Amino acid sequence: MAMDGLRPEREELFERNGFRGHIGGQTGVLARWGLGVPMKFGADVEICGEGEPVDYVYEVVHGAVRTLKILPDGRRQIGGFYFAGDIFGLEDGDLHCLSAEAVADSTIRVMRRRVLIGLAGGDRDLAQQLLVMATREIARVHGHALMLIQNAQERLSSFLVQMGERIAIRDLIVLPMSRQDIADHLGVTIETVSRTFTILESASAIKLPNARTVLLRDRAALRSKPPRPGAAARR
Amino acid sequence: MAMDGLRPEREELFERNGFRGHIGGQTGVLARWGLGVPMKFGADVEICGEGEPVDYVYEVVHGAVRTLKILPDGRRQIGGFYFAGDIFGLEDGDLHCLSAEAVADSTIRVMRRRVLIGLAGGDRDLAQQLLVMATREIARVHGHALMLIQNAQERLSSFLVQMGERIAIRDLIVLPMSRQDIADHLGVTIETVSRTFTILESASAIKLPNARTVLLRDRAALRSKPPRPGAAARR
DNA sequence: CGAGGTATTGACGGCTCTCAAGTCTGGTGG
DNA sequence: CCACCAGACTTGAGAGCCGTCAATACCTCG
């Protein structure tokens, strides 16, 4: 992936646009505090496993990570994707409910949770930052749940809009994840994802130079509800 | 149906209205620290509204609360139900993404978020408790998302198992919320909820003395997957 | 070029939504 | 006491979206 080559460009773009998100390797909480050890993970390598002790907290320096859970029947739920500056692994209790894997080759800052919590105890600012990260994660997961009650077209549209805000260069999204990853995140099948991509392209909302590249042509159309024939507002 | 006060009214209430008298249930974090002011809310009264400033944090003393979001097309998503000891209103940013309403007559501890954060800055223990509450909420919302990718029977079963763990007396659940509330939480229609209740009762997994009372007869059956004909494990 | 994984497209069936009618319950008033 | 009503809940029939299975196209890499 040519993601590394694109990064400086994106960084400039974000600054110029006043983008509030995270970019580069210096913007994360851990990075700013100089905490944690950067480590490299190859594509599809597991970073932490479901059921393992929650010993570390992670921050993406660059690359992309997915958190996931395998259901007893084999289905796979992807809880979220994390990009540069995002923190993951914030979990309650002693054991991970979700495992995490690198979607593409990635660098991840790894830090002992106990140490981080300890430092936060003596640093008001860091403690508050941690709480902010946690509440932000709550909002993100809520958004995920909200998406899951919509239909396939709405789900994929929301996903693309979100990716547009998080990892797009202007209107161009280079997806690090596969169709299967997207499907498992949106709670639909890979076939439905594929069909819906085609529908959105036919509607001129997006353009697909290739399977992993999406050009957003009409964000407004993606944000608006697709024609839902009989889907009357209930109540 | 108490009237829902205007926002300024509510704020004034929060500011100077103190609830006098003995309060049962000292189970929550705020209660243990003696923080916040207990207030009463009638059934269906709004506690905080979507789009309002995030000024307070709430803890249920007794009763039940739902957090919800109204979609542009009128659909309603219930993010979660909160019972005695549960904290809600932990949100990121300045504005609430979710509103909260009392499901039944309830008593809620209300506390200024800024004050709580401030106190946590000087109290290691409280700060850690707050972070635990936040990560626990993350796990809960993840569980909600996980439920939303399953079929109707699995969704209702999970919901009942969860209620069984949170508000049941032995195997008896007295539901404070309506079928519509359940439907909007599970992301299905009220008819599907109703039909699925009937199916579970026919299967002897539960018994329904009346619509708001559920007797769990076979938790194992509720936890196990229902017959999903062609639902092969993918991948 | 061929191989293998990934993605798209097609046909069909089932689960759930929609629309509609029926039942139950609690409250009100004659 | 009972008729009546309003609201919540249940049940039924038909339609549509999406899952399943299957075949085909595309893309990357040896």
Image (tube, coloured by chain):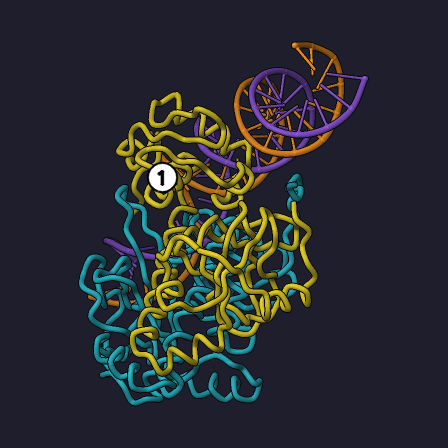
Chain colours: A cyan, B yellow, C purple, D orange
Depth order, front residue of A58/D1? D1
Q: Nearer the viewer, residue A39 or A33?
A: A33
Name the kind of residue labelled 1 in the image.
Ala
Vertical order, B163 against A39 (above or below): above
Q: Residue furthest front?
A: B21
On the image, the x and y values in percent for residue A82 come to 38, 70
State the image coordinates of residue A186 (x, y, percent, origin top left).
Answer: 44, 53
**Foreground residue among A179 and A41:** A41
Question: Disc 1 is attached to a residue of which chain?
Answer: B
Q: Residue at x 54, y 82 (%)?
A: A19
x, y percent for residue B145: 41, 52
Residue drawn 52% across and 74% down?
B93
Q: Is residue A194 visible?
A: no
- Residue A180: image location, x then y, percent: 37, 54
Residue A231, by quadrant, is: top right
Badge 1, how many Cα within 10 Å: few under 14, some, many 20+? some
Q: Quadrant of the N terminus of chain B?
A: top right
Res B5 → quadrant: bottom right
- Above or below, comparing residue B106 to residue B34 in the picture: above
What residue is at 37 percent from the left and 60 percent from the top? Answer: B28
Q: Tell me if I can see residue A15 in this picture.
A: yes
Query: SS of the residue at dot 1?
Result: loop
Above or below: residue B186 compared with residue B199: below
As drawn, B183 above or below B86: above
- Residue indicated by mark 1: B168
Q: A165 or A120: which is nearer to us?
A: A120
